Amino acid sequence: MPFLPAPRPIAFAARLLCLTISSTLLCQPALAADSAALDASAAADASAGAIQTVHVASTRDENSGFGATRAGASTTKSDLSLFETAQSISVLTRDLLDSRQVTTLNEAIQNAAGVSSGTWGKRGWDDFSIRGQRASESIYVDGLKLNQSNYVAQEVFGVESIDILKGPASINFGLVQPGGMVNMVSKRPRAESFNQAGFAVGSYRYKQATFDLGRPLNDSGKAAFRLDGLWSDTGDQTDLVWFKNHYLAPSLSLDLGPSTDFTILGSYTRRQYLRTQGAPVKGTLLPNRNGPLKRDQFYGEPGFGPYDSSQKQLGYSLVHRFGNGWKVAQNFRWQTMSMDGRFVSMSALSANELLQGRSAQLQDVNGHNRALDTNASRTFAFGGMEHNVMAGLDLNHDRVHYGNQVCRIVALNVLNPVYNTAVVCPPASRLTDTTVSSTGLYLRDQIKLNEQWRLNLAARHDRARNRELNELTGIRQRQDTSSNTGNVALSYVLTPNIIPYVSYATSFLPVSGSDFFGAQFKPEEGRQAEVGSKFQFAGGRINGAMAVYDLTRTNVTTADPDPAHLAILSSAQVQTGEQRTRGFEAELSADLRNGWSVQGALTVMDARVTEDNGGTVGRRLLNTPRQSANVWANYRFRGGVMDGWTAGLGARYEAQKTGPSVDYTVPGYTVLDTSLAYQGRGYRVSLNVKNLFDKQYYAGVLNANVLPLGDPRVAIVKAVFDF
């Protein structure tokens, strides 16, 4: 089957990214000057006879503007810059998120190549895939994994940046899905005092209030306190649907001496909402014999709800530098999570396509998580080479209590809906208590072989224990697994501005359950080969990356092909599935001296089922467009009557999507976003319009019956005051 998709959408996406790149041509004088400075710095190092280090002669903060030069230390567990790291990593900076007025994690990660988000509708928590593979259960905060069954969407107002690591990441993080993971880097105290308050209003009754306060606690500013918070209340394009959010995050840095950094981090999140996942396929995307259906119609029950979820986190980050060159880093977090929810799901339409079948559910989930990661590292010379060696141990304990009741509810007339009907709920159909504990030991050596060549070698061993109690039947299940994973990468400093690389990485993820005969499922495994290149110009103000990769996921559970087994156990499964993603990604970010800031990404991806017991072999994976692209550009006016103004314009494109078990295709779409902002003395006012021309599109494929809707045109006006 062909790897490259049809040329027409690719040509559009390529033109979109080229528009981003062409913006950099306006800064050629500054680019040439800074590139010369870089070359001079590199030549000076070479003449000194030292092993060459890639220097970034930047006069700005590392992650200010749109272009980050480093990921969070908890993401890479390394002192290397993004330019020097032989792996695909996207970093979404605070300035980029604020420029677009991002309000959710799903919306934020649309800026990254290889990511598809929001395709499961507005369930109330974060849903996304990376490189064709579902990655929603691989969300980390400050390098520590959240509860695996986390039903609380993460608040993006409380982050300094969002790092997206693509491909198998078990070497640093253990039990993760093979497509990649997201690490949210929390805001931390600063050495200076600041006070900021923000207020926003927008479409669909959107209201938001925020604050961000900070104080140094000693003269050096190393001891400091920070408190940020958010309240929001909004409706939705779907009638009767609403969302309310509360967020509070204190943090405290202590001065334990010049060799020690210690920060305590906490947060509290509460979300209440009436859930919706979309509209019937027939009557929206496909014809309905009764005519088109309204896009704003609600198919649930307004009186059967809402969801009420909360999350609490408390932990610390510790780094100590010993006098002999060793550095020890430790991160710890305790997390609790609870969710009490009611929702109505949609099944098939009736034969006359007039009555929408429905099913109601009661969900009660609560759990906690303890995570601890400790590593020690040191740089030294040996055998004429420079080594940065790290050894680490991480521990994770995860417990979830899950209760579910499946209730009966009458069908809804799609042309004349009548709400507030009776919901009959029998006793709980599922009541489980699950504990997952894991221990990982990892080793890594980053080697500078000579002035050009860099070699990264890493290995890890994990042990995982799963215990599950079915409280309805009293049946207990035990599962113990272990696995070895690794990573090897080789890079070459072609010039001070270009570093190509090649890498190979593996991952593993335990799978709970057993086959018809009671044999425990083996862990899923992932493996990926990647070839890419990093680019950096203008003292770190222009950053780019591109990569081609081949990713395979094995030991995927599929339906048992034996009819005799299914007759006895309808949910019987075997592990014969395999999925493969091959693709190309390119990203560019630039913060130029002439007022332009630009971020763009391009993805070409072929993700398919390669082994299965059914008829899905060769079919594309769920919600994986063959092409996608995005660009966001700001221009800051300087001098004259427009001094202080900033204008922004962007576009987002996704090709058509489908799934292995559905018979329809969701068409591709392109939407435009724009912004206009004014920075005054002590205040900033901005207007963002998303989906400027109110394009009607569909966010993804859910199943054969339900179609998640894309977001309509939304306007948000926000004012932020410094005092």
Image: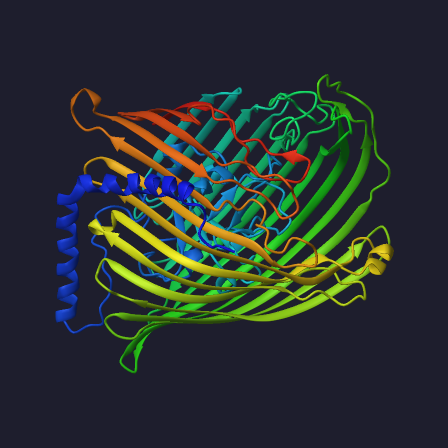
Instruction: Tell me the quarter of the image containing the C terminus.
Output: top left
Which residue: 70% across, 20% down? 290
Residue 568 in sight from this viewpoint: yes
Q: Residue at x 31, y 61 (%)?
A: 84
Seen in the picture, residue 627 relative to 276 is either above or below; the reply is below
- On the image, which quarter does residue 592 sit in? top left
Is 500 displayed left or right of 320 in the figure?
left
User: Is residue 138 shown left or right of residue 288?
Assistant: left
Residue 168 in view of the camera = no
Percent position (x, y) of residue 308?
A: 66, 34
Image vertical order of residue 560 relative to residue 344, above or below? below
Closer-to-camera residue (376/173): 173
Q: Quadrant of residue 463?
A: bottom right
* Residue 379 percent across, percent down from the top left: 33, 71
695 lies left or right of 494: right
Q: Position of residue 139 (x, y in %)?
A: 54, 50
Q: State the image coordinates of residue 350 (x, y, percent, origin top left).
A: 77, 29
Of all residues, the one furthest to the bottom in this rendering is 383
**Within the image, what quadrant is residue 642 found in?**
top left
Q: Tell me what residue is drawn at x 45 percent, y 39 percent.
A: 108
Vertical order, 592 against 260 (above or below) = above
